[in-house]
Image (tube, grey):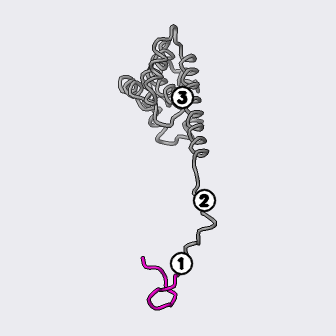
Amino acid sequence: MHLVIRGSEGLEIYNTFKFQSPESKANYSEVLQKFEDYCSPRQNVVYERYKFFSCVQLEGQTIESYVTHLKTLASTCKFAEQENGLIRDRIVLGNNKDSGLQERLLPENNLGLEKAIEIVRAAEASWEQISNMKYETATINYVKKKENPNQPKKSSHYECKKCGRIHKPRE
């Protein structure tokens, strides 16, 4: 059925596959795996790791978004058991928002991925709260200049002292 869907090009590709035994040619899951291997681009692990180790947290990017991106990159790097530790390292080293955050993360004993995420999440919440407080303080301290009710309002026209007529003010 798979070959019918793929058409003549699929049949041509199928005929190039090497199978362990004649029975495996009829095994749907093995045939499907062969097609997936054929269609999936070959990945250069060194280049995939370069992308992972070059990844830094962008300005305005939340820790959740950054970790998701790191996990996506790590999935092609074949890190195996070291994946969580290396993601944790990128969180510590790839943070461009605040060097003080690195100073808080580095001395932590037994810093795991979840603990690093928790610390950064708390820092992000603090930054947002501080930003909001600064904005609210600036709004509260803003003084609007009130007009003096005793002072005559400036008119868009005035009475000319020379001719006595009413004119627009000179600009």
Whole-percent x, y for residue 140 in the image: 61, 45
Query: Quarter of the image containing the N terminus?
Result: top right
Q: Secondary structure at mark 3?
A: helix
Query: Quarter of the image containing the C terminus?
Result: bottom left
Three-letter amino acid code at disc 2?
A: Lys
Give me the C-alpha separation between circle 3 and circle 1.
Answer: 56 Å
Three-letter amino acid code at disc 1?
A: Ser
The residue carrying pointer 3 sits among few (fewer than 14), some (14 to 19) or many (20 or more) residues within 10 Å by Cα, namely many
Whole-percent x, y for residue 130 in the image: 57, 33
Residue 156 badge:
1
- Magenta stretch contains residue 164: yes
Whole-percent x, y for residue 86 in the image: 46, 17
* 6 over 55 or under it: above or below: below
Specify the segment rendered in magenta: 158-171
Q: Nearer the viewer, mark 1 or mark 2?
A: 2
* 28 over 1 or under it: above or below: above
What residue do we see at 53% from left, 25% from top? Answer: 25
Q: Nearer the viewer, mark 3 or mark 1?
A: 1
| Horizontal arrangement in the rendering, residue 153 relative to residue 43 (left or right) | right
Q: Nearer the viewer, mark 2 or mark 3?
A: 2
Q: Secondary structure at mark 2?
A: loop
Residue assigned mark 3 = 63
Residue assigned mark 2 = 146
Which circle's residue, 1 or 2, is located before the other in the chain? 2
* 17 over 168 or under it: above or below: above
Whole-percent x, y for residue 84 in the image: 51, 16
